[in-house]
Image (tube, coloured by chain):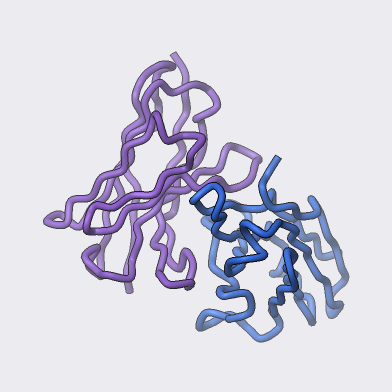
Amino acid sequence: QVQLQESGPGLVKPSGTLSLICTVSGGSVSHDNYYWSWIRQPPGKGLEWIGSIHYNGSTDYNTSLKRRLTISIDTSKNKFSLKVTSVTSADAAVYYCARDVNPGSGFDCWGQGTLVTVSS
Amino acid sequence: QSVLTQPPSASGTPGQRVTISCSGNSSNIGNNYVYWYQQLPGTAPKLLMYRNNQRPSGIPDRFSGSKSGTSASLAISGLRSEDEADYYCSAWDDSLSGRVFGGGTKLTVL
């Protein structure tokens, strides 16, 4: 049973960089059909897809966030990570990592989520 | 201002059948699979439906999905108190080259 766990600072300063890691256990990130994704949810609001990465390094990013985003993967450590630069209060959210199974099987496994607050 | 449009709320009494709609366009729902997620209060979302109408293992057959043109629906029959949650639709959007979500529908079991 694969499990995902987000980790990282819960508080980021405005204009700073948000950095999160998702650790995958119970399965390998190195699978052709899996895309490893980040999704966020501002308090009291809906879900927003941030981006995804395949173990071969190919990425898809939300076009509205793309210029501030970096998603990377470390197959040797079975982890993938998210960096968002120049954060503002609009980036405050619960950040989830999830597994996207292709083709067409959706985000079938999610982490519990981690709250990131943006404040000085 | 979500790309996919859902009603903000829905309600029903135990045992009733409720449906939640999701409207998009030819770039997303019209040309791609629709997914549904259930988010119970204080928890991560859970995959409820994939490829428009397929249930993952463990999802009861009280839940069903359908798609027609640029719209999709999630139906819940035999409504139960534990179905009270937020429901989100999602699809790939060819124009945006990314996943999009609906704004979510809060289902209340009266």
Examine the image and state in which quarter residue B13 appears.
Answer: bottom right
Residue A84 is left or right of residue B91, and the answer is left
**Residue furthest toward the top?**
A120
Q: Is residue A57 left or right of residue A14?
A: left
Q: Colour of chain B?
A: blue
Q: Is residue A32 above or below residue A92?
A: below
Q: Residue furthest left?
A: A76
Tell me: A59 left or right of A46. left
Q: In the rendering, at what x and y percent does residue A3 appear?
A: 33, 64
Residue at (79, 50) in percent of width and height: B8
Q: Is residue A117 visible?
A: yes
Residue A34 in picture, x, y percent from top left: 33, 66
Question: Chain A in the picture: what colour?
Answer: purple
Q: How many marks?
A: 0
Which corner quadrant holds the N terminus of chain A? bottom left
Q: Measuring 31% from the left and 43% from the top, which residue is drawn there?
A: A71
Q: How far across and down, in percent of the image, does residue B97 sit? A: 49, 51
At horizontal 40% and vertical 16% (from top left) the residue drawn is: A15
